[in-house]
Amino acid sequence: MSRTPLVETRHLYKIFRSQSGLFRREKKEVRALNGVSLTIYRRETLGVVGESGCGKTTLGRTILRLIPPTSGQILFEGQDIAPLDRRTLRPYRRHMQMVFQNPYTSFDPRFTVLKSIAEPLVAHTDLRGDRLVARARELLQQVGMPGEILYRYPHEFSGGQLQRLAVARALALNPKFIVLDEPTSALDVSVQAQIINLLKQLQADLHLTYLFISHDLSVVQHISDRIAVMYLGQIVELSTADTLFQGGALHPYTKALLSSAPIIDPQLRRERIILPGNPPNPANPPPGCAFHPRCPVAVDVCSKVEPSLLEVESEHWAACHLVGKEVGA
Amino acid sequence: MTEPLLSVEDLYIRFKTYAGTVHAVNGMSFHIHPGEIFGLVGESGCGKSVTGLAVLGMVPYPGEVIAGRILFHGENLLQKNRREMEQIRGGRIAMIFQDPSASLNPVFTVGSQISRIIRHHRRVDRHEARALALAGFEAVGLPDPARIFRAYPHELSGGMQQRVMIAMALASGAELLIADEPTTALDVTIQAQILALLNDLRAAQGVSILLITHDLGVVAETCDRVGVAYAGSIVETGPTAQVLYQMKHPYTRGLLEALPRPSHRGKALQSIPGSVPSGLDLPSGCPFWPRCPEVMDICREQKPLPTRLDEVGHRVACHLYSREGQR
């Protein structure tokens, strides 16, 4: 398979600044993205996993320029879109879409299905009238919804049905890249399976590239080709889904995360690594490796020097002082 | 066999609303033995949470229990009066919820809240209550109990708040803990901590736990026995291993096949067609028949009764296994 990058980020930073206290004298900085560099290849699904506050949602939104990055580059088909303004960014928007976690808040309750789905078409194309309706029907068909629901309202649908409609809206402009931010987290398992199957089918049919953000390891494992594991605004490990889920994880955080996920198959159950404590506050990160206060194998250097993300094996990146040593030995 | 600590028998709960009568629980039956972790698992709207609330007499308005019995130590809780229930609730039976921050009052310190509950249920003075609370914090693995006692809820993380809730439940001497999605709002590494804690407490203090969850993985790793609920009744129950690895009910099988897991990688997931029925308009007969791949004529007419399959208590409510269905 020839692999060409579709989206790349280079040293992407997003720092949220807030002021609080008397006369707003206390200034706080939250480094939601702390130097993220990654490549998303055409037609692949890159999964992003991590716990709350690790910056995975911020990553998705920053790549789409829904929020501006503090610094760094976002390359879309080789073009840096980070410095573009509203007007110059507009031609790129149609190629990049998003599906959100909560389908109930993704739709304007006063809009009919047609109005919601047609909105991107009205904004970016000159389709109008019958041709607009025809395109909307076609989109509904693609996501397995009957065409006659065009004039119904969001409250008439279940969560799973709304998520299908959200996918239809994301597909309206024939995008190349879709960020899926926890698209199945609000759904029951039987419905979740329907949406996952739909997303995989659409990817194959329409040659889509996905960034799939989730905290649910089993879902990410199922849908992703490669997986990036985030902790406190940084990627700590990146490899193929097969490597990570077949015992090839190298970073101690990834190992602990994978072992924490409840597993149904008894033969696949592993020794559980229970991490002490909580993920640190991103406003006040520990020095050195951000993971060292919870790390079961931390050594002296971990609290002083920040490890960088290195390619330790082919296609396998990890940011850990100990991983390099193991490989070198 | 020992006497069950709790047994829910043929429970029916309905909600009268403007839109019509919602039949939330329809003949729910299960039991929990002393020292056992029983998982009540199902998708949204299957009646699992409202069943947990019913045990404590907390079904919210306009819901009402219309039939059934809830026996705790052999006594029917549904016949207790308000004062008797106030002694049981938070005392011998305690409950923790999905969102611990919503269960703690933000304007009081954690210590004052737990002390108040302890003193409601036990005849102790302020100092003894404090000692019990600190011991409780210690037992649930909270670091620096004295600091936690003085803290306000917002100063604690979600995992720590959930530990405080568990400590409150235990400090007043609960024999049964009802845990409604106790880890759903928590990150996986914190979820692992809390599940390990529940397991330890069961072993150390002999607490029985009714674990209400939608997550079959959580059930597989923590529960001794499990009941799978659908549309307000149990469709399959038994020891966890039997139900999860030798499942008989088409719904249980559907749920397990819909879960993404390593053995399914690269294949399309099996999904259950359609969606969960609304309690407003339940199908006649077996509530699962409109989605069932093995539906027969009888399923549309008659609701199947639980059939016992083996000696270890694996039961399934499905006409594929019932006497009526065999005819």
Image (cartoon, rainbow, N blue to C red):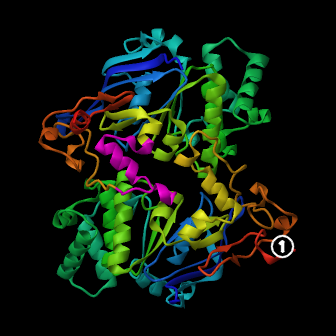
State yes or no: residue A74 in magenta. no
Q: Secondary structure at mark 1?
A: helix
Viewer-proximal residue among B249 and B300: B249
Horizontal side, residue B260 vs residue A20: left or right = right
Marks counted in the figure total 1
Q: Amino acid at mark 1?
A: Gln
Front one among A90 and B253: B253
How far from the left and from the top, in percent, is residue B69?
61, 84
Q: Residue furthest front?
A: A329
Side of A303 relative to A84 (left or right): left
The chain holding disc 1 is B
Is residue A23 positioned above or below B259 on the image?
above
Position in image of residue B240 (x %, y %):
54, 69
Q: Which residue is mark 1?
A: B326
Q: Is residue B155 left or right of residue B98?
A: left
**From the viewer's perspective, is residue B126 above or below residue B167?**
below
Quadrant where the C terminus of chain B is found in the figure = bottom right
Check disc 1: other Cα within 10 Å, few if <14, some if 14-19, many if 20+: few
x then y, percent, for residue A241: 46, 37
The magenta stretch spans which residues? A245-272
User: In which quarter of the view is residue B295 placed?
Assistant: bottom right
Question: Residue A156 is drawn in which quadrant?
Answer: top right
